[in-house]
């Protein structure tokens, strides 16, 4: 038993050191280089700067007529609207798919789940958005983000709703609740754990999305925080200090959210998959 405990402790230490090397070291490397001048940062070393230049972060904010501030506003709106849409659509879809057991719902469920395996097609999506006159608009980008995340979120909600006793709904029917009020007053309040998981996972994913805004939301006025990296790399191709400062600025908000709500992410996914 002592030998087994020692091996487990050794495994924990190795895992912790590996995590530090994989996750903490790159972040520390970027932070140190973001405080250097241009010449020092271009050496890409872990040496401490001769002088800590905190004004690099100010330069990032002021670059291109405060494009970073505009990008934060766009990313915030995109994230909030997309997450709200996903909660509304996926919670109701998951409820219907879980409670209705017929052939039609089986086909609908199959179609939704294929979205987990089939990647999005860029050009057809752009053609559809242009036909609907939502290309290069925040509304169109919100619709794209919602469509991409629906399969996974419906799966989470459906699994969790399967753990809710049907007797609660039957009692609601006896008390005179209609279908809409039954879902809103009885079922949805019970979905808080999985809803927290959906909020956090999608908020982090959408806020950090680079590819989709690049294709579907072009233009400097529509820039999101991840696209500022693309712009800085083009404008400051040799100024790694400003590039790393921008990376730190857009990484910290979601990193804090993830650290605070990490336990809720795990609990919500386990509740929605194992119990369901």
Image (cartoon, helix red, strand yellow):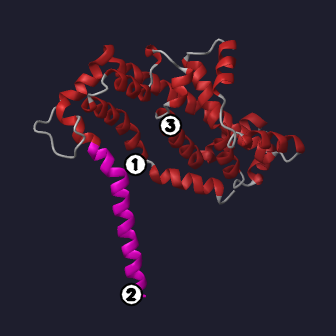
Q: Nearer the viewer, residue 62 or 229?
A: 229
Secondary element at tag 2: helix
User: Percent from the top left, x then y, of residue 11?
Assistant: 40, 72
The residue tagged 1 is 259
Q: Badge 1 local density, few (<14 within 10 Å), some, or many (20+)?
A: few
**Residue 59 placement: quadrant:** top left
SS class, disc 1? helix
Q: Are marks 2 and 3 in contact (CB under 8 Å)?
A: no
Q: Position of residue 264 (x, y in %)?
A: 50, 51
Region of the chain picked out in magenta, as a range? 1-29
Rate crowding at label 2 as few (under 14), some (14 to 19) or many (20 or more) other CA atoms within 10 Å: few
* Label 1 close to label 3 by CB (< 8 Å): no
Q: Position of residue 70 (x, y in %)?
A: 39, 19
Is 247 magenta? The answer is: no
Q: Is residue 11 above or below residue 210?
A: below
Give the quarter of the figure containing the C terminus. Answer: bottom right
Residue 143, placed above or below residue 178: above
The residue lying toward the viewer, choosing from 164 and 44, is 44
* Residue annotated with mark 2: 2
Query: Where is residue 52 shown, x and y percent of the image?
Result: 14, 36
Residue ID at (65%, 14%):
130
In the image, farthest residue toward the left: 50
Q: Earlier in the sequence, mark 2 or mark 3?
A: 2
Residue underneath mark 3: 203
Mark 1 vs 2, N-terminal side? 2
| Camera-nearest label, 1 or 2 | 2
Q: CA distance from mark 2 to mark 3?
A: 44 Å
Name the main secondary structure of what is drawn in magenta.
Answer: helix
């Amino acid at each position: 038993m002592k030998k087994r405990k020692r091996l487990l402790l050794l495994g924990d230490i190795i895992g912790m050191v590996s995590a530090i090397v994989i996750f903490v070291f790159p972040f520390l490397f970027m932070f140190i280089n973001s405080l250097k001048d241009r010449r020092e940062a271009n050496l890409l070393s872990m040496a401490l700067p001769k002088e800590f230049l905190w004004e690099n972060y100010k330069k990032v904010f002021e670059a291109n007529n405060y494009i970073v501030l505009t990008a934060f506003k766009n990313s915030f709106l995109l994230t909030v609207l997309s997450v709200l849409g996903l909660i509304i659509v996926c919670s109701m879809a998951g409820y219907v798919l879980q409670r209705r057991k017929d052939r039609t719902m089986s086909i609908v469920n199959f179609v939704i789940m294929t979205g987990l395996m089939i990647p999005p097609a860029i050009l057809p999506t752009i053609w559809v958005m242009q036909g609907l006159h939502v290309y290069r608009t925040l509304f169109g980008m919100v619709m794209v983000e919602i469509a991409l995340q629906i399969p996974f979120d419906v799966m989470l909600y459906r699994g969790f709703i399967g753990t809710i006793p049907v007797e609660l709904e039957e009692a609601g029917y006896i008390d005179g609740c209609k279908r809409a009020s039954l879902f809103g007053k009885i079922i949805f309040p019970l979905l808080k754990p999985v809803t927290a998981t959906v909020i956090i996972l999608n908020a982090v994913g959408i806020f950090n999305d680079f590819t989709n805004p690049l294709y579907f939301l072009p233009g400097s006025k529509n820039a999101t925080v991840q696209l500022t990296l693309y712009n800085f790399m083009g404008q400051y191709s040799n100024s790694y200090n400003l590039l790393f400062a921008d990376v730190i600025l857009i990484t910290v908000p979601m990193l804090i959210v993830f650290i605070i709500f990490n336990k809720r992410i795990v609990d919500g996914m386990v509740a929605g998959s194992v119990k369901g």
